[in-house]
Image (tube, helix red, strand yellow):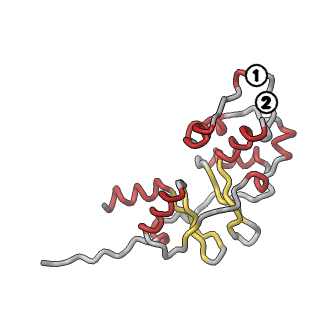
């Protein structure tokens, strides 16, 4: 009987290296536009040295509105169009992310004044390029996150999404 030895799947095997990145000084309106254009719901925030300093998601933009009563942008006088987001909606995420990405009525003064650095999450979970698939999955499941950033030292080198993991398992078992 022949025994096949499987090489462990590492972060470097799964990660995407072509990333949408944001700067902490970018306006929230521009950040949301960037995420929408790229078709992603979140992106790493890096400094001038490409070091990972945070993550910003459409959910962060939505949370800002919920917590401050429209800090992200002032609405036109259409109260019926303002979503009624409760804590369960914020946990679910998908509907909230979709609602934020589809909005086009953010007030230009407020949205230009707000910066990604004010709303990003500075507590970013990451793995090294040598982390194995089990470690990546455990981190995503334990922390209930949709993406893990791959860093060498403090420099961002890639990202792995939950969809990347699912696609790998579907192709390779």
Label 1 neighbour load within 10 Å: few <14, some 14-19, many 20+? few
Query: Which residue is disc 1 drawn over?
Result: 78
Residue lying furthest left: 1
Q: Could you tell me residue 139's position as x and y percent?
A: 50, 63
Q: Could you tell me residue 58's position as x and y percent?
A: 65, 45
CB under 8 Å between discs 1 and 2: yes
Q: Could you tell me residue 19's position as x and y percent?
A: 61, 60
Horizontal arrangement in the rendering, residue 141 relative to residue 17 (left or right): left
What residue sits 70% from the left and 69% below the top?
A: 50
Q: State the SS at label 2.
A: loop
What residue sits 82% from the left and 35% below the top?
A: 107
Q: Height in image: 154 above or below 33?
A: below
Q: State the SS at label 1.
A: loop
What residue sits 46% from the left and 65% below the top?
A: 14
Q: Which mark is residue 75?
A: 2
Label 2 neighbour load within 10 Å: few <14, some 14-19, many 20+? some
Horizontal arrangement in the rendering, residue 83 relative to residue 11 (left or right): right
* Corner quadrant of residue 5: bottom left
Q: Could you tell me residue 1's position as x and y percent?
A: 12, 78
Q: Which mark is residue 64?
A: none
């Amino acid at each position: 009987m022949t025994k096949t030895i499987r090489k462990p799947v590492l972060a470097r095997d799964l990660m995407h290296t072509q990333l949408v990145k944001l700067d902490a000084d970018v306006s929230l309106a521009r950040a949301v536009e960037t995420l929408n254009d790229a078709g992603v719901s979140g992106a790493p925030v890096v400094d001038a040295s490409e070091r990972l300093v945070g993550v910003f998601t459409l959910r962060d933009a939505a949370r800002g509105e919920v917590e401050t009563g429209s800090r992200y942008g002032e609405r036109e006088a259409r109260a019926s169009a303002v979503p009624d987001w409760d804590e369960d909606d914020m946990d679910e995420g998908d509907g909230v992310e979709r609602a934020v990405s589809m909005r086009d009525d953010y007030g230009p003064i407020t949205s230009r004044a707000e910066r990604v650095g004010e709303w990003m999450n500075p507590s970013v979970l990451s793995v090294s390029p040598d982390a194995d698939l089990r470690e990546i999955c455990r981190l995503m499941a334990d922390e209930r996150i949709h993406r893990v950033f791959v860093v060498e030292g403090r420099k961002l080198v890639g990202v792995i999404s939950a969809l990347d993991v699912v696609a790998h398992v579907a192709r390779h078992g």
